[in-house]
Image: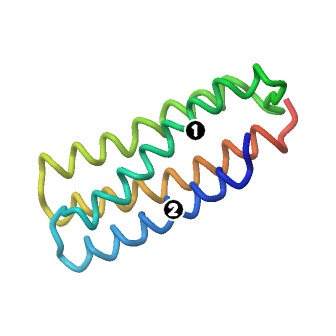
Amino acid sequence: MVEWFTFTQIFIALAAGVLCLVLGFAGRTPSDLSMGPIALVAVLLIAQLVMAAIAPAVGNHPTGSLLEFWMYQIAIVIVPLLAMVWALVERGRWSVVVLGVSGLAVSVMLYRMWIIWTVQGA
């Protein structure tokens, strides 16, 4: 996997999560300011999914468990999408907090996926 892309995703997910948490605890309802960063994270995660599918074909194989990696990959794509749907349906300040928590969870899962791909032995 491309290391700079993964760490850029982790930083964006962390920043989006912190921004949404701050907005949620400040009492803001979902808006473009809170939905936009999480939508960007979701788009980057779809790009990550495509890269993860192509990487073994060009000789870049994960060093850890494929099952664990793909379970993280599936969860990591679903989590921000479900959080955005929740925010659009519920439209309350706590839905912005849910967006923030999803951003933080995505950053942790991205880091774990990077460990599985590069460092961890099978």
Q: Specify whether 10 is left or right of 62.
A: left
Q: Specify whether 13 is left or right of 52.
A: left
Q: Looking at the image, is 65 positioned above or below residue 57?
A: below
The Cα atoms of the two marked residues, 1 and 2, are separated by 14 Å
Q: Position of residue 53 (x, y in %)?
A: 64, 24
Quarter the C terminus occupies: top right
Of callouts 1 and 2, the N-terminal one:
2
Q: How is the image coloured?
A: rainbow
Q: Quadrant of residue 108?
A: bottom right
Residue type at numbered disc 1: Gln
Q: Where residue 12 is drawn, which disc sits there? A: 2
> Are the residues at dot 1 and dot 2 in contact (C-beta closer than 8 Å)?
no
Question: Which residue is under mark 1?
Answer: 48
Q: Which residue extends farthest right?
A: 121
Q: What SS does tag 2 mark?
A: helix
Q: Position of residue 116 (x, y in %)?
A: 75, 39
Q: Specify whether 112 is left or right of 82.
A: right
Residue at screen point 58% across, 38% down: 48
Residue type at numbered disc 2: Ile
Label 1 crowd (10 A; few <14 / some 14-19 / many >=20)? many
Residue at screen point 74% across, 50% down: 3
Q: What SS does tag 1 mark?
A: helix
Q: Specify whether 75 is left or right of 65.
A: left
Q: Quadrant of residue 97?
A: bottom left
Residue at screen point 75% across, 28% down: 65
